[in-house]
Image: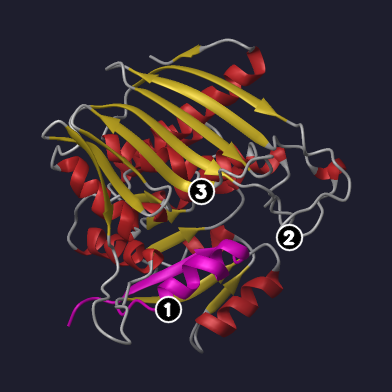
Amino acid sequence: MSKVYRVGVIGCGGIANGKHLPALSRQDKVQVVAFCDIIRERAEAAAEQYGGAEAAVYTDYKELLKDASIDIVHVLTPNDAHAEISIAALEAGKHVMCEKPMAKTAADAKRMAEAAKRTGKKLTIGYDNRFRQDSQYLKKVCEAGELGHIYYAKAHAIRRRAVPTWGVFLDEEKQGGGPLIDIGTHALDLTLWMMDNYKPKVVLGTKYHELSQKEDAANAWGPWDPKKFTVEDSAFGMIVMENGATITLEASWALNSLDVDEAKCSLSGTEAGADMKNGLRINGENHSKLYTNEIELGAGGVAFYEGKEEKSTDVELRKWIEAIEQDKDPVVTPEQAYVVSRILEAIYESAQTGKAVYLD
């Protein structure tokens, strides 16, 4: 019989209950045996719904890490605690999945990557958008060289009015930033992964607090409190890579725009281009004529049946367990995630100083 991995969850808030715990509950090879949160009632509620009769509940993650029977830890806390807890878990002999972004700062992200290498334990970051059907298909197109050399790309993370008003999303001290580090991180990760290009050279960025101070604003989750909105409402960046390729990144929770997309990218190569803006489309030139191919990702073709699509979060978890089981690199490596954090931090630095940031 194959091993059943014992999992401990640190942080039992929205991302735990909305993504990780449901996905973990659908995996045959894992059992969630420990739940930790600084608010005991949250840990108890999660344990009651997703844990067995023997599930342990903690308010101190250090106590959870003392359990030698736990194989894997999922770190689902605010950004400022990612590094401290992930490094401690790796040093305690656990494999770690940490939610995105990797850390609040690039320096902390680097420490996490170094800890994984030092301990020999697996570390991955929760960039689940890589596991969508359109992402998986486009990655195969890129790997096959069908786009040629990708020299220009756009990373899209734009919401018209969808500012998260719960938890610590608006707290710069806890999170390190707003939409750029929250949803821009997904779009940037996806774009770099498609390009297979992790060597940034120079970054120029801007950030804005233009709509954050509006009272009684229209918003998907109700009006935000301007006094608590300490992070940017929008941020934009231009990244030039060592090989000369250019990436533009747009991230906003609130922007007066009808052109909204989240966790998507557009790619322009020497042989063809691709975008995720209206489904997945490949464009190019063939026999002196332009073409646009719309990729059909559903099964379909049979009356009353549209096919069964595995949730991206389930694919993410399945691939994560396979990496541990087969002792191979996870799909999202710590080295890749560190580059994402480094670029995001450079955009913030450039926005603050008004100068380009050169990365060596």
Q: Nearer the viewer, residue 300 or 314?
A: 300
Label 1 or label 3, whichever lies nearer to me, is: 3
Q: Nearer the viewer, residue 133 or 21?
A: 133
Residue extending farthest to the left is: 287
- Whether residue 29 appears in magenta in the rendering, the answer is no
**Which residue is under mark 2?**
221
Is 337 situated left or right of 28 in this image?
A: right
- Between the C-alphas of marks 1 and 3, the distance is 27 Å
Q: Secondary structure at mark 3?
A: strand
Considering only vertical position in the picture, is 82 above or below 23?
A: above
**Which residue is under mark 3?**
262
Do we see residue 335 in this rendering?
no
Q: Which residues are magenta?
A: 1-28
Q: Secondary structure at mark 1?
A: helix
- In the image, what residue occupies the spot 69% across and 49% down? 161
- In the image, what residue occupies the spot 38% across and 78% down? 26
**Which residue is under mark 1?**
25
